[in-house]
Amino acid sequence: MAATWECPSCKRRVPNSVDECRCGWLRSRVPIAAPKPTDLVRGATRRGWEIWVGLAVALVLLAWGIYWMVRPPAPPPATGILGYVDPTPPPPKPSPHRK
Ligand SMILES: [Zn+2]
């Protein structure tokens, strides 16, 4: 917030602590600056941009979900526990007690 306000009558900068200009203009008579139409347009475009990004993210997530529903990932290959034989058995250990 500005520390001064401009007197519309004499264009002098007056501190915020002073409510009356030297020319006699009261601060309460200063019109409140209305937002410019360009600011409104800029805000609207920014909001539109955020909406489009949100829609794009939602669309990507939706497509990803549909893809996973139609083509779920293949389950990992199951390894049988019973009857499982090692393809290459380890070499027999030499026994030092038997000769
Ligand atoms: Zn003034």
Image (cartoon, helix red, strand yellow):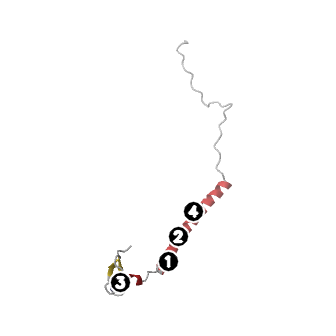
Marks 4 and 2: CB-CB under 8 Å? no
Which residue is drawn at the image coordinates 57% and 62% (left, top)? 57
Q: Which numbered disc, 2 or 1, marks the residue that appears first in the sequence?
A: 1
3 or 2: mark nearer the eye: 3
Q: Say which element carries label 3.
A: loop
Q: Say which element carries label 4.
A: helix
Q: Say which element carries label 2.
A: helix
Which residue is drawn at the image coordinates 64% and 54% (left, top)? 68
Where does the image place residue 52, in percent across and percent down from the top left?
A: 56, 68
Where does the image place residue 59, in percent across and percent down from the top left?
A: 60, 63
- In the rendered view, tell whether residue 40 sits above or below residue 77: below
Q: Nearer the viewer, residue 48 or 56?
A: 48
In the image, the residue with mark 4 has its CB under 8 Å from the nearest atom of ligand 1: no
Q: Quadrant of the N terminus?
A: bottom left
In the image, the residue with mark 3 has its CB under 8 Å from the nearest atom of ligand 1: yes
Q: Which numbered disc, 4 or 2, marks the residue that appears first in the sequence?
A: 2
The quarter holding residue 6 reads bottom left
- In the rendered view, tell whether residue 58 sits above or below residue 22: above
The quarter holding residue 84 reads top right
Kind of residue indicated by mark 3: Cys
Q: Name the residue beneath numbered marker 2.
A: 49
Whole-Å distance between the Cαs marked 1 and 3?
Answer: 26 Å
Q: Name the residue beneath numbered marker 3.
A: 7
Whole-Å distance between the Cαs marked 4 and 3?
Answer: 50 Å
4 or 3: mark nearer the eye: 3
Kind of residue indicated by mark 1: Leu
Q: Name the residue beneath numbered marker 4.
A: 57
4 or 1: mark nearer the eye: 1
Q: Nearer the viewer, residue 5 or 81?
A: 5
Which residue is drawn at the image coordinates 41% and 84% (left, top)? 29
Q: Name the residue beneath numbered marker 1.
A: 40
Kind of residue indicated by mark 2: Trp
